[in-house]
Amino acid sequence: MVMTFKATRNIGLAVMTTIIVMTGLLFFITTTRIVNGVSGILQKERIKLELIEDIRNHFLDARETFNAFVHMQTKDMDPAVRLINLALKESEELKILVSDEKENMVKFISVARRFRVAIITYAEEVDIDITGSRAIEMEKIAQSAAREADISLTKLVKDIRAKIRIADENILGISKDSQKMSLTGMFVGIVSGLLVAFFMGKALMRPISKLVNATHKIVAGDLNDQIKVESSDEIGKLADSFNKMMVELKTTIERESSVIAKTKIAVEKEKVSEITALNQQLRANEGYLKASNQQLKANEQQLKAKELTLLRAQEELKNKIADLELFEKVTIGRELKMIELKKDINGLLKDLGKEPKYNI
């Protein structure tokens, strides 16, 4: 069974969409469960840390108030007692939330209660005798309890911060795992896309190869071959359009061939008429050329006769020029002699003391 391009495309897209949706749902469900669990733990630990910080602040304020009372900077111990009572109340509430830190919490409550008893007793003893041994002993007990309580609270804070850090690392790990899952889903989507493209290309190449072969036949002049339409999808429509185009092309070529043949006959007839007219014109021109040739020969003889006449006239002119030159020489010589003679006469007259006769 040969699958059509449309069927291959629809099946491929359905498979690819299913894979991508399933991968996305699996990633979303898994990540949501893990993140919700870790987020719940992280939120719980942050609440515990805030409560412990409040308890620690109350206890430190109570300790500072006690130290101020010991150094006589204040005369009222009630604020310290109220602060330690508040810290103990919040500690009892926090003890319900803690599990791993319950031992440290119980220890802090015990030490805080001892601190409360010590500061209350110290305040009573100071009223009796400020330098009494009982007052000094209560001060030492209170300071020791304060240090122990501070150590317990510090350890609680460190433990809870360690849990928060672990939760943050888990979230970071989940983020990395989600990235890996995203890359996996992307890879699966790309592979499925390539497979779909491969099968779509394979289904597309068969009809396209037929179209290419039919095109080659058209180039070779064969317009009788028709492509078999096997489907009603886009490729089938393309093949049907191609067949219609071949029929129209064949009809057009036949019609144009007929027009060309008729035009060729008309052109040949017109050329024959033109050639006949040209032939007649050439014959008429031939007679005209013969007459012109005879006229040219007669003109040539006349030119030769005129050339001889000109040569004779030229020779006579040369002879006349020679005679004139000779006459000129003789005349000029005579004039020069007369001028010399006139100069001699003027000289003689001048010697005789007379006026020269000639103006030279």
Image (tube, rainbow, N blue to C red):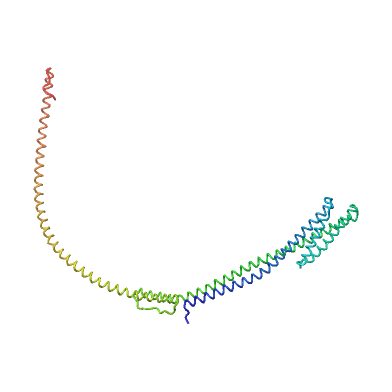
Task: Give the quarter of the figure containing the C terminus.
Answer: top left
Residue 6, given in percent of the width and then of the height, sits at 47, 76
Query: Observer-nearest residue: 254 or 218?
Result: 254
Residue 135, given in percent of the width and then of the height, sits at 89, 55
Q: Is 51 rendered above or below residue 210?
A: above
Residue for point 11% across, 22% down: 357
Q: Is 108 rendered above or below residue 249?
A: above
Query: Observer-nearest residue: 31 or 123?
Result: 123
Question: Which quadrant would residue 331 be assigned to in this image?
Answer: top left
Query: Observer-nearest residue: 299 or 58?
Result: 58
Question: Which quadrant would residue 241 be assigned to in this image?
Answer: bottom left
Question: Which quadrant would residue 208 be assigned to in this image?
Answer: bottom left
Would residue 137 appear left or right of 278 to someone viewing this image? Answer: right
Residue 156, given in percent of the width and then of the height, sits at 76, 63
Q: Residue furthest top?
A: 353
Q: Is 345 rendered above or below residue 290?
A: above
Residue 227, given in percent of the width and then of the height, sits at 39, 78
Query: Observer-nearest residue: 157 or 299?
Result: 157
